[in-house]
Image (cartoon, rainbow, N blue to C red):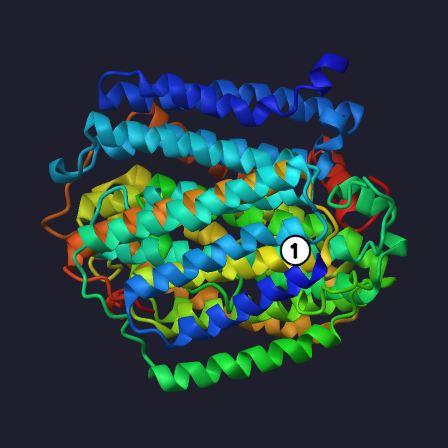
Amino acid sequence: MHGMTENIMAVLLLINLALTASSRLAGCIGLVAMQGIAIGLLPLFSQEGFTPRGFFLAGFVVILKGVFFPRLLTNTIRNASVRREVEPFVGYGFSLMIGTALTAVSFWLGTRLPLPSSPAGMSLVLPGAISTILIGLFLIVSRKKAVTQVLGYLVMENGIAAFGLAVVSKIPLLIELGILLDAFVAIFVMAIMIYHISREFDHMDVDQLSTLKG
Amino acid sequence: MVYIENMIWLLAVLPVLSGLICRLMPSARLVMASTASGVLVIAGIDLWVVITVFLKGPMTSNGGWFRLDALAAYHLAIMMLVFLLSSFYAVSYFRNEPDALRLNPGSARRFSALWHGALAAMTLVLISNNLGIMWVGVEATTLLTAFLICLHISAVSLEATWKYLIVCSVGVAFAFMGVLLLAASTGSPVAGAPILQWTYLHGIARTLDPRLVKLSFIFLLVGYGTKAGIAPMHSWLPDAHSQAPAPVSAIFSGFMLNMALYCIMRHLPIVTIAAGTAGWTNNLLIFFGLFSILIAAVFIISQHDLKRFLAYCSVEHLGIIMLGLGLGPLGVFAALFHTLNHSLCKTLGFFSAGRIGQAYGSHDMRKITGTLRVNPLWGGGLFGSILVLIGVAPFAIFMSELILLKAAADAQKYFVIVLFLIGAGAVFMGALRHAIDMAWGEKPENAVSTSDSLVDLMIVIAPMAILLILGVWMPAFFRTMLDLAAGIVTGGRP
């Protein structure tokens, strides 16, 4: 059972690295969707187990992060008719190196955090979560397009979900639902904003949003 | 009384109901008028609840999910005051907008819905006893208020909204990691223990793992600090405040920032008790507070945009409140007193800036001259509010800053006094020059005078009167309120 947790976390780490190196916007959306599904299934194989509550939450997350968000973002970039490349500030090779370095840092941090002893077979969850959060942050600051910032935010959210799993035994259902609702509204609001930005500016490059200063 | 106590959650539902009713109104004017009256009714109910809390002690409901104690009730009162003033101001503000920006029924309904939504989310933050729900509420305010900034869609307003959305969402996500770490610091609790409940955590604070609690506090400080506009996480704040319509800037500055700071205040007693000493948190709070004051001072001196100037004043004053939180019981008392003063004064400041901006067609302080002759009411409001903001005696902000300095002197933190005076002094000089130029100076040709209603007069007079009265005389019941609220922050029994 716990072997499965490790497998999922390994997939998550690989997706992180793939995200830093992939150049196609559509590919990135697909990768983030896969990561969302993996995060949704993770609780089933750790604390939660195959309980009704576990299945309910997992189904909810998988539909939201695996189906709804990617659809919404794909529609947004189609309506905004943007170029399909990611356009990073730093090159893909260099991004990949930074991604690897961040992952290494996460493994070091994972051993330093004074957490109450985590269950056996969860050794990858904490470093994986920290790495996902850091790479999400890196994607937010290093990519030009508004859509890639949203993707970075989603990756960070996934990381925090995994982090929660690693450090807290059980979050009450009401709060889980509240967090998911917030994520849902956040992505929805961001998608509408991207639509308006692309209509107003004929682009959605955030590095050109620089009129307001001082 | 039992049935009332179990109804706290209704406070967050009321704005939603009022928002739904306002959607049914046929014209933009009716939507705005019903929004104002809806908020008035809610304010009445909230006032009654606040008084009940101060007379009878904290209320808990729904198995401990919701709770209203003195600290929350005090903030609830400030919130309703800010929303009440802003809702009535919004009616006249939007009526005086130039034709191109006038609200149509659709955009008025959108404004009203988001306005009520923001009110509901902020109420949820204040009434929740569960730190997870509190976080959900904070994140919800970010999302609900985003479209209020770009109510009038333009290139700059979209830019401001996007920055606000991304910076605050990411910042607040950090706060959630703080909440998770705090929950983790309980170790291995008994199954089913409400590990995110504030009263539970407060009760067992001594047994929490101090290292994890400290780590969580850093995340919380950065996360909620972003939302509170504490430097260096304030980058979104001047943009959002300057581009939003004036009533929205007023609720941002008047309460949303304080709401985020309230979340930090909530966590403070737990962290202090768990760490065994207040010294560690105090140093962090003093550092961020002073840093905000000094950074804001630099930007205020070189500022030309009126609303950005007021926005940086918010960074300064939120810094002052945070500084007060780090200066012991008397400092906390001053910080809470300052919270009310700043909210009232900044609300009036943004109100006046909005109407003056409409009269001059610009927010450039070099073009806004002779406001007292163009529009005595709002020109006077602007001049008065800037004077109060920079701490002119005998108004209330002068008093709260004086108490704060006394707290610093009592704690023998003399470098705090020096740095505070440098920052406040720089702001004083920079702001006074702007204020005098704007109030007197040449009256330009293009400025349009508008007629002001009795409500407008009330909106200017009421905050100034309260600030003056609190500056010269603090009523006994108000002192008791502040003492009760401050007692919670400093870790006394709730």
Quarter of the image with the N terminus of chain A in it: bottom right
x 32%, y 47%: residue: A72
Q: Residue at x 67, y 55 (%)?
A: A165
Q: Quadrant of the C terminus of chain A?
A: bottom left
Task: State whether residue A24 is above or below residue B15.
Answer: below
**Left of B247 or right of it: where is A177?**
right
Q: Nearer the viewer, residue B401 or B363?
A: B363
Asked if residue A65 shows in the view, the reply is yes
Count of picture labels: 1
* Figure quadrant of residue B136: top right
Q: Residue at x 56, y 39 (%)?
A: A178
- Using the image, determine if residue B113 lies above or below residue B254: above
**SS category of the residue bearing label 1:** helix
Return the residue found at the far right.
B207
**Which quadrant would residue A22 be assigned to in this image?**
bottom left
Toward which corner of the image does residue B117 lie, by quadrant?
top left
Q: Amino acid at mark 1?
A: Gly
Query: How far across and down, in percent of the image, does residue B141 sit?
Result: 48, 42
Residue receiving disc 1: A164
Q: Position of residue A32 (x, y in %)?
A: 42, 60
What residue is rendered at 45% in x and 44% in y?
A64
In-front residue for pair B66/B407? B66
Residue A208 position, x and y percent, is: 23, 69
Q: Can you give x and y, in whole percent of width and height, for residue A148 in the image?
A: 34, 64
